[in-house]
Image: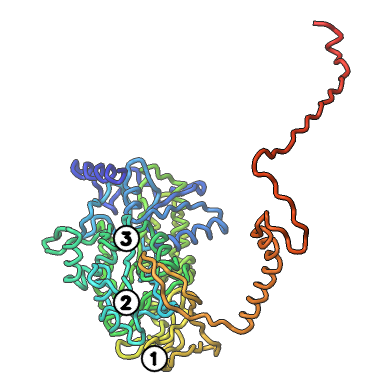
Amino acid sequence: MRRHVAAATLAALAIIGVVGSGVGGAPAAASRTDVGASYATISGIGSTWSANAIQQWARNVLSNYQWKVNYSDAGSSAGRQAFALPNGGADFAVSEIPYALKNSDSVDPVPPRHFAYMPFVAGGTSFMYNLVIGGKRVTNLRLSGATVSKIFSDAITKWNDPAIAADNPSLALPAIPIVPVVRSDGSGTSAQLTAWMRSQFPDVYADLCQKAGKPGVGGSSLCGITSNFPALPGFKAQSGSNGVAGYVAQPQYVGSITYVEYSYALNSHFPVAKILNAAGYYTEPTAGNVAVALLKAQINEDQSSTDYLTQILGGVYTNPDPRTYPLSSYSYMLVPTALEYGFTLNKGKTLAAFANYFLCQGQQDADVLGYSALPINLAQAGLDQVLKIPGGDPTSVNIAKCNNPTFSSDGSNRLATTAAQPQACDKQGTTQCATGTGGAANVSTAGSKGGSGSSGSSGASGSGSPSDGSSDSSSGGGGVATSDVSSDTRPLTVAGKPMTIPTSTVTATPGLMAAAVAVLLVLGAIFGPPIRSRLRPRDRPRRGSPERPKRRAAGFAIPKIHLRSVRRERAPSPSSTEGS
């Protein structure tokens, strides 16, 4: 209800002509010399895709500098709407998509508030899954883009579908249902996924639009990019990135798959599917692969545009570099550029300092957190936006002192330059790498078809060695363990339905049998005599004892014994001697 009220308010403001430019002047603009006197607490709201990064950075600055940054990961749509509220619903917001996204079916107009888009953090939208074969967790799944799109448009519904089998020549895939897990709330991740599907697989996306009953937009028969992914029958809808990742990570939900930022799979210790890129290699969204992919991103560099610094990802989707992860992008922070909506100079002092930190020093942690550091062009553009935040200290902004891991002396992206080439077994064909991915990178999956997989050092180039179905060896020489899901035939929940999955059988050893017999003998010796005594008829004489006379069935009663009660005399109380 609150969302509809906010949308209606914004629409009304747009009609009466008060919608301002995101980069225009502000009615209460601060001078460059107006710096906040102290660091005030600031509050933001938005993307769950970026939440793991921003919450860690907020902890860092609180610990090191005592700057207090509160952040609610309520979703990108909620963030954009709260930032636009006239009463100052948020000091900043984080989103994967801008306002008024082109070819979108969502009503999300540019707000009257003066603001700028600031590049925040880069990363990849991954496909985290829960799949078991023969009691072993699968960690090396591969999927083409068309197959992923068909899974999330309900065109492929079983894990042993021929299209999935073609991507995975070493796996004997089970004939169990696929359960797509989608976001129930407005999500930039959903918008990124649908933008990619709409651009690269329009026929499949048209099928999704038809099933969801969504009309065409932008002069096309295709429905629009949406932040609210349709939950078709058989899909599971969960709120937030933690919600979808948490659902898939539950051991009972075998057969489920979701789309989520790579860091959530890392934190859950779960694998992600390698996705087929334009060069014919299956890759995952490592920091290097994302950095390579974003070299082909087109950036809106028109400073007079309300979409300044927003991205166009068509070139990323089709980047011919073998290291590319196709679903790579970056998110935006929406920062105020005027003293309005409750924003003050002291809040600006904190926000500008925090932005300066995460654009430079904070990017050092991006890889560890499951993201990719911003390249120098986006970091420089972001620092230019920092200077627009009223209350910030302009003397602290200096690209020469920006400790960003992508920077190099020749201006190239160091992270993209040093990114490893994919293994030969990651190339589309009859071989398949056995090495794990995501949060299960140290767990290999032996070929269940009898050795058509290959393994090698993760991230290293080379042909890899053929898998014979045994445990693979890591580069350190130690055995790489396969993941046991169960060691017996306990029932699991597959696609939400109780099923018994055959796993390893339990063999009774002689020692186990002897122990069981001993336990039974002891129990018999303890409980046997009392049980036999209770079962013996009462009127039957015991063997070797004289026969007892039988009690009469009638007229027999236990005599009552009446005991005279003795009452002890108590001494009179003091009150009784005073009279009443």
Residue 233: x %, y % from top left: 26, 61
Label 1 crowding class (10 Å Cα cut-off): few <14, some 14-19, many 20+?
Answer: some
Say whether marks 1 and 3 touch (CB < 8 Å): no
Q: What is the secondary structure assignment of the residue under circle 1?
A: loop
Residue 139 placement (x, y as % from top left): 42, 78
**Above-or-below relation of 263 to 335:** below
Are dots 1 and 2 in contact, CB under 8 Å? Answer: no
Q: Which residue is mark 2?
A: 175
The label nearer to you, 2 versus 3, is: 2
Please, what is the three-letter code of the amino acid marked with disc 1? Gly
Residue 271, quarter of the rendered image = bottom left
Kindly report which numbered mark, 1 or 3, lies closer to the viewer in this rendering: 1
Q: Amino acid at mark 2?
A: Ala
Question: Measuring 47% from the left and 57% from the top, which residue is drawn there?
Answer: 354
Q: Nearer the N terminus, badge 1 or badge 3?
A: 3
Q: Residues within 10 Å of mark 3 (few under 14, many from 20)?
A: many
**Front: mark 1 or 2:** 2
Of marks 1 and 2, which one's residue comes earlier in the chain? 2
Which residue corresponds to mark 3?
188
Q: Which circle's residue, 2 or 3, is located before the other in the chain?
A: 2
**Quadrant occupied by the C terminus:** top right
Residue 366 in view in this figure: no
Instruction: Estimate the x, y position of residue 572 in percent, counting from the top left.
Output: 87, 15
Number of dots carrying numbers: 3
The residue under label 1 is 450
How far apart are the alpha carbons under marks 1 and 2?
A: 18 Å
